[in-house]
Amino acid sequence: MTISQLSGIAKEEIPMIHVIMGLKGSGKTKKLIDAVHQTVETAAGDVVCIEYGKTLTYDLNYRVRLVDATEYGIHSCDLLKGFLCGLHAGYFVITHVFVDNLYKTINKPVDAGMEEVDAFLAWAARFAEVNSMNLTFSISEDIANASEEMKKYL
């Protein structure tokens, strides 16, 4: 039975992609960690957390597969897409993927436009839906600067 069946909410009303957005120091990582812990207790499949560097090692439950993006050379949207596809292809029982600090992971310059990230989020939404996977990204950016694409997932 799916979450939508349990809750009585139509599937299209439940986003499979979420964005946690805020300036540095606003508590994004804490929210992400809390979401990971809540998810690991209720998930029907496996939970993966992708981070930039090894900062969450002692913060996450041992059942969460923690991946350091720097160890795999992930530094662009295209490489992150490929990595997510590879994760799913290699181990399709993953139901939730969390990405801490998306901008740092994809090496997005602070002053760069949102077009590439918007295109990535649109791709991620399609990928999540097709593969019955939930994706959550934290983004270090003022929420007032969120694009229309991002606002759909806040």
Image: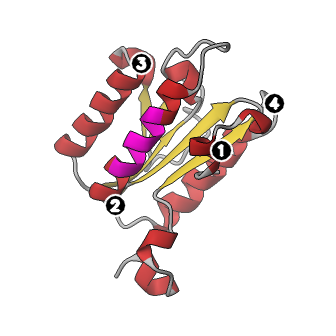
* Secondary structure found at label 4: loop
Main SS of residues in magenta:
helix
* 1 or 3: tag closer to the N-terminus: 1
Name the front one of labels 1 and 2. 1
Residue at the spot 48% in from the left edge and 20% down from the top edge: 106
Kindly tell me whether residue 73 is visible in this rendering: yes
Q: Earlier in the sequence, mark 4 or mark 1?
A: 1
Q: CA distance from mark 1 to mark 2?
A: 22 Å
**How many other residues sit within 10 Å of disc 3, few (<14), some (14-19) or many (≥20)?**
some
Task: Give the mark nearer the N terminus: 4 vs 3.
Answer: 4
**138 shown above or below 141:** below
Residue type at numbered disc 3: Ser
Residue bearing mark 4: 25
In which quarter of the view is residue 80 placed?
A: top left
Q: Compared with residue 149, is residue 34 higher up or lower down, i.e. above or below?
A: below
Q: Which residues are magenta?
A: 119-126
What x and y, as percent, mark residue 100? Answer: 56, 34
Give the residue pinned by disc 1.
20
Instruction: Based on the picture, tell me whether residue 125 belongs to the magenta stretch.
Output: yes
Q: CA distance from mark 4 to mark 1?
A: 13 Å
| 108 over 29 or under it: above or below | above
What residue is shown with label 3? Answer: 76
Instruction: Give the side of residue 71 with respect to residue 118, left or right.
Output: left
Q: Is residue 84 magenta?
A: no
Quadrant of the frame with the N terminus: bottom left
